[in-house]
Image (tube, rainbow, N blue to C red):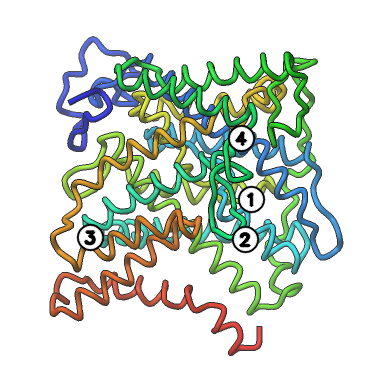
Amino acid sequence: MTRLEAKGPTPDPAAAPKTDRSWLDRFFFVTERGSTYGREIRGGLTTFMAMAYIIVLNPIVLSGAQDINGYAPTFAQLTTMTALSAGIVTILMGVLGRAPIALAAALGVMAVVAYQAVPQMTWPQAMGLVVWQGIAIILMVVTGVRTAVMNALPHNLKLAIGVGIGMFVALIGLANAGFVSAGEGSLLQLGTTGHLAGWPVAVFIIGLLVSAVLLARNVPGAIFYGIVTATAIAVVVTYVFQLGDDTWGGSAPRLPETLFTAPDFSLFFQVDLFGAWTQAGPASAAVILFTLILAGFFDALGTVLAVGNKAGLTDENGQMPRTNQILGTDGAGAVVGGVTSSSATLVFVESTAGVSEGARTGLASLVTGGLFLLAILFSPVFGMVPGQAASCALVLVGAMMMMGVGAIDWSDISVAIPAFLTIALMPFTYDIATGIGAGIVAYTVIKTAVGKYREVGWLMWILTAVFAADFGMAGIEHLLGL
């Protein structure tokens, strides 16, 4: 097998001798997981490069959402809080979960906060619901509910979740790069006008091809080198052809005028835990909280499974070590995100980019988290990386996650249909939780209909009911007059 295909069972920390090894090696299981310090650092750097866009994207989305009083946090405030939350919680994941999983403002939750919660209440009240989301997730971990849900998912669905997330990540990368866009007369189209044009797309293609060639040649750091190459080219063409900042959409590849900027911590602890229930009403607040929990719960569940499988940390049943600590940290991230007013800070699927570069332990998360904290001061430097350069990593990660599709039992139609729906609906609906939900509902109904109800556990029936309610939420709200 090549370096990228290598995958093994859950590492046993007791399997390798601990003599003549540093405490750092023993604590993070570096040797047991077949990694090195160099791979962990490189993987952490690559994950950060693939996630750095969130430092710009989260403030863009949230600063444009006004609350019921017409207030919205400033871009500067949200930039500081987004990087701070990501840094703190990712480091916490490295220490407690000891897994190569980074966390940042969750895209799905961000949308719920901006477009569903904030218009009905004040910003502190909306952040209070985010804190309650984190508390609910932590309680699910403590009581074993979240781990039970992970264990209840059939093995083939777990494989499909990983593949579907790969498709979703690839679509994000292609869209961010401008390689595909919403079509005129079609859902999607090539480029932004029906064909490829412009330097941003060219930079993306160059970075993609450089990384792909290096990956095929098993060069360590292939994805990272592709991002750096694309960034360097982007900086050059920006000055040579005098391109405007709007050409790149978000982060413009320009040499910064200053290396650092003063952070703004004024949003810290601006949270109201109980105001939403009176401001928006108990029913509306409950619906929003349910949506937040559902989006965060299953997005994180799918991401953890995908990262663990890609890193070779899962056993034959799809279980990975320190699951409770990983999921508990994810819940704590939602609390931290609410306290900092940056939205829920949850596990990021872009972590697979670092895993593809060799990251296998929490040491990589320490590197990624440290870079997020540095970004608070050195945001102009990190802002040089255009989204098109980072997007090549996402597309290649999606391609590599697709390798798991061959392990799914496609000969059994009662498995094939749920697996297909799981894979297809993640990119088609632009939502991980929707794909997982569709797969669970289809699996439960089809298996039962063909007389294989014994293969469906009671917890799968509960999940089916929850997702059925979620899919029909608009009708339920209409019936209740909400």
Q: Of callouts 2 and 1, which one flags the residue occurring earlier in the amino acid sequence?
A: 2
Q: Is residue 365 left or right of residue 283?
A: left
- x 33%, y 28%: residue: 360
Please name the amino acid that badge 3 sits on.
Answer: Pro
Amino acid type, residue under disc 1 in the picture: Ser
Q: Earlier in the sequence, mark 3 or mark 1?
A: 3
Callout 3 touching callout 2 (CB < 8 Å): no
SS category of the residue bearing label 2: helix
Percent of width and height locating residue 464: 35, 73
Q: CA distance from mark 4 to mark 1?
A: 16 Å
Image quadrant of residue 371? top right
Query: Distance from label 2 to label 1 (Cα)?
Result: 10 Å
Task: Name which residue lies at 23% across and 30% down.
Answer: 5
Residue 343 shows which numbered tag?
1
- Earlier in the chain: of badge 4 and badge 1, it is 4
Label 3 packing within 10 angstroms: few (<14), some (14-19), many (20+): some
Q: Amino acid at mark 2?
A: Val
Query: What residue do we see at 25% from left, 23% from top?
Result: 3
Q: Is residue 396 left or right of residue 265?
A: left
In space, the residues marked 3 and 2 are separated at their CA atoms by 29 Å
Foreground tag (2 vs 1): 2
The amino acid on which the numbered mark 4 sits, given as a three-letter code, is Tyr
Graded by Cα atoms within 10 Å as few (under 14), some (14 to 19) or many (20 or more), the crowding at tag 1 reads: many
- Mark 4 / mark 3, whichever is N-terminal: 4
Q: Earlier in the sequence, mark 3 or mark 2?
A: 2
Name the disc covering residue 112, or none: 2
